[in-house]
Amino acid sequence: QVQLVESGGGLVQPGGSLRLSCAASGSIFSINDMGWYRQAPGQERESVAVITSGGTTNYADSVKGRFTVSRDNAKKMVYLQMNSLNAEDTAVYYCYADVTVSLSTGYRRQRVYWGQGTQVTVSS
C-alpha cells in the first residue's frame, strides 16, 4: 500500500557531502514524522534525524551541525543532507515515515513504513 524509495547513497571521501532522498507513494492520507536511521556493520540500527509534519527537527548528537533533514510535504519526500562526512558515518541508511493510510473499507490505519536502505561509504 505504501512504498518508500531511497536514493543518493554511494562512496564519498572523508570531509565530503552526500544528499539522500526518500519518496513515499501509495494510498497515503497523511504523513506524520519522517526521518532517517542508519545501521553500521555489527551495530544496532540508530536514529539519525527526524522531522515532524510541522518541520520540527531532532538529530543524534553524533551528526548535529553536520547533517540536515528536510521534507517536501507536497511531494511526500524527505531528504538528508550530510556534510563533513567521516568513516564513522559509513552505514546503510534507512528512511521511514509514520503514515496514515486510507483503506478500501473507508477506515484509516497508522503505521511506520521503511525504505529498502541505501549504502553510504566514507573512505579515501
Image (cartoon, grey):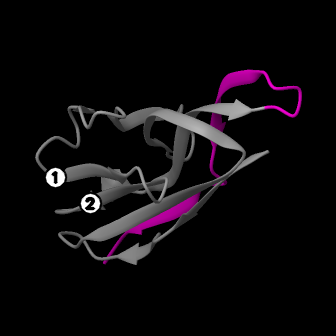
Image: 19 above or below 94: below
Give percent across and percent down for residue 77. Answer: 46, 56
Q: CA distance from mark 1 to mark 2?
A: 6 Å
Q: Mark 2 falls on what kind of element?
A: strand
Residue 102 among those drawn in magenta = no
Q: Is residue 76 left or right of residue 110?
A: left
Residue 87: give its label.
none
Q: Are marks 1 and 2 in contact (CB under 8 Å)?
A: yes
Q: Is residue 116 above or below residue 100?
A: below
Instruction: Out of 77 and 8, give the one closest to the viewer.
Output: 77
Would you name the residue on which mark 2 appears? 82
Q: Label 1's element? A: loop
Which span is picked out in magenta? 103-124
Crowd tier of the residue under label 2, counting other residues whose Cα lies within 10 Å: few below 14, some 14–19, many 20 or above:
some
- The image quadrant of residue 47 is top left
Tell me which amino acid carries mark 2: Met
Image quarter hosting the C terminus:
bottom left
Q: Is residue 62 left or right of residue 97?
A: left
Q: Is residue 114 above or below residue 47?
A: below
Residue at position x 63%, y 50% in the image: 115
Q: Position of residue 25 (x, y in %)?
A: 65, 55
- Residue 66, numbered label: 1
Q: Can you name the residue that lies furthest to the left here?
A: 65
Q: Quadrant of residue 86?
A: bottom left
* Residue 57 locus on image (x, y percent): 24, 34
Drawn side of residue 63 relative to residue 35, left or right = left
Q: Residues within 10 Å of mark 1 (few under 14, many from 20)?
A: few
Residue 35 x %, y %: 42, 40
Residue drawn at x 22%, y 51% as measured from the top left: 68
